[in-house]
Image: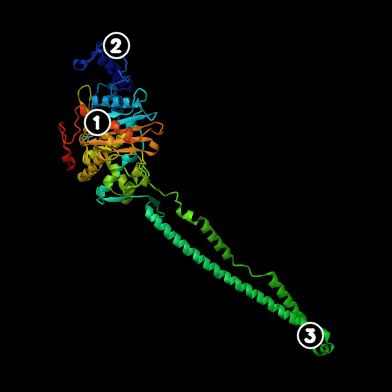
Amino acid sequence: ARASVLQRMLLAGYISPDLARKVAAKGLPKSMSHGLVPEQQEGGPGSGTGPNGSVVNRPTKSGVPFRAPFFVAEVLYQLRDLLNDNEVLRKGGLQIHTTLDLALQERAEQILQEDGKTTRLGEDKGESALVAMEPTTGAVRVLVGGRSYMKSTYNRAMLARRQPGSAFKPIVYLAALATGLVTPRTEVEDEEVVFRRKEGGQAPGWLAISKKDKVRMLAEGRQERQREREQCAQEIRRLREGDAKAAKKHEEDKREVRRRLVQVQRRIAEYESEMDERGKKGPAYIESLLQESTALEEELLDLEEDPPLPDPAIEELEAFLAEEDSDGEEASESDDEQDYMPQNYNRKYRGVVTLRQSLAESLNVPTVKLAHLIGVDSVIDMARRLGIRGNLPFELSLALGSCEVTPFEMAHAFNTIAAGGVCSRPHLITRVKDKANHVLYRHKPSAKVVVPPHICADMHRMLRSAVTHGTGRSATKGWPAVAAAGKTGTSDNYRDAWFAGYTPSLTCVVWVGRDDNTSLPGSGSVLAAPLWARFMRAAQGSGLPTEKGTSKRKGKQRWRSLSGVE
């Protein structure tokens, strides 16, 4: 294992070939060679050095090139950013002090490997990642980026951005508690609700429409449509009455013209039959009768060829009525494409619940209502304060984890909650010395209060309920989890399974998923929470305190002093 590390440091340019041979020729110190089988002693086939002290690249017993491979690989990656002097890196001989708990790291690797060999519902469980760090210091104790480093060196703990699902909800509740508008005992109705995006305005927003509101709006809509139909029918009747009057007048006009035409024609006939009258009245008389007859005939012809037409508005109004009769109900009840209607995991609704019950049972509707109350911008701000740096969409669905985060970011966020609102910068490297024992880098603790302690105390009680009475109960099985708190998470279509939780002395996040983003055979409570419980049990067995107020490490604080609660 040591030879593999030397070989990789040589290839990466951290040490020179002469230094690599010199270190390999020295062999292991006696304090590190205790317990090795004979073939692993200096010069043996498993020692990592050849007969002449040359570096031999031999894998460890598990097949990986060196112990804690994901952790070491991340340390080497960060080392280049910490030490900008390439000359120092080229010379090598560096002493790198890290936060690694090697025994716990290897136990975590073993847990993930063993779990990966099992199946559920006839399917494999995909990949997994685990991150563990200390709340009070931000020291990363365990970093496992996959089930097998030999099969894949991709560090999912640091690089895989996946949807956290309900594991993101505590950030929403923490943001709401920080506003002072709500408390864990605040009641909210878990009900069918539609969030409709408001039109216009510079800032995006939504209008919450519950099922009750929808029923009321539908009833009001039906009443409004009924009023419109009645008004439409009245207008049609008025227009038809007008058309009838126009038609009647038209007929009367024709009858009047016919009557006058008959009279004129009769007078013409009388004039032609009586010879004496001709001499008395003269030709001008008959000429006027003929002109009047011609005019009346033309007027009658116009009246017959141009009858009054029905008002075109009647046809439009009738079409409106017909459209309302066939499509009005369906159109009024259909949802807009931009409407957002969250649903609970089991498609059922609980009615009135407290926020504490809502988080414990991972109810979606109350969570989205909460985000709508305080504003999505407040949720994003809280996520940034807790250490999440990825893209966060300005959508209500963000409350249910419709964003992408890494397991490391989630561990950072929950680590801040575990520390009572004190954000300590996560770190893997504590100190770097050169071969002359000069300190080239020393980690400077950075602690900042980003959330008031009493708010985190309320959040702790709510997350504690999630593992005692809610969806995270499987995280407490098999070990005395008297101080554990956390939250499960499952993304859409079971693509990701999470459990993020902590004790006063250790924060741990477990992610399970597939690299091709296909579905898993279970949720976070089934796939991730049991792994978290096994790891925390191992942490307790390794001497790391996991119970409230029992830490014996120097500098540790009781949970009471961090959050003000028991």
Q: Position of residue 114 (x, y in %)?
A: 32, 25
N-term mark: 1 or 2? 2
Q: Position of residue 261 (x, y in %)?
A: 73, 79
**Rendered view: 278 above or below 544:** below
Q: Nearer the viewer, mark 1 or mark 3?
A: 1
Q: Nearer the viewer, residue 243 or 417?
A: 243
Q: Position of residue 185 (x, y in %)?
A: 24, 49
Residue 146: quadrant of the picture: top left
Is any part of residue 202 visible from this angle?
no
Tag of residue 478: 1
**Rendered view: 166 above or below 47:** below
Mark 1: few, some, or many residues within 10 Å (few <14, many ≥20)?
Answer: few
N-term mark: 1 or 3? 3
Q: Helix, strand, or loop for circle 2?
A: loop
N-term mark: 3 or 2? 2
Under mark 1, the amino acid is Gly
Mark 3: few, some, or many residues within 10 Å (few <14, many ≥20)?
Answer: few
Residue contact between numbered discs 1 and 2, judged by CB atoms under 8 Å: no
Residue at 39 percent across and 50 percent down: it is: 194
Residue at 57 percent across and 65 percent down: it is: 314
Question: Spatial distance from mark 1 to mark 2, Cα to Cα?
Answer: 41 Å
Q: Which residue is mark 3?
A: 284
Q: Is residue 5 left or right of residue 436?
A: right
Question: Spatial distance from mark 1 to mark 3, Cα to Cα?
Answer: 129 Å
**Rendered view: 552 above or below 399:** above
Under mark 3, the amino acid is Ala
Q: Position of residue 564 (x, y in %)?
A: 17, 43
Q: Is residue 459 left or right of residue 150?
A: left
Tag of residue 45: 2
Q: Helix, strand, or loop for circle 1?
A: loop
Under mark 2, the amino acid is Pro
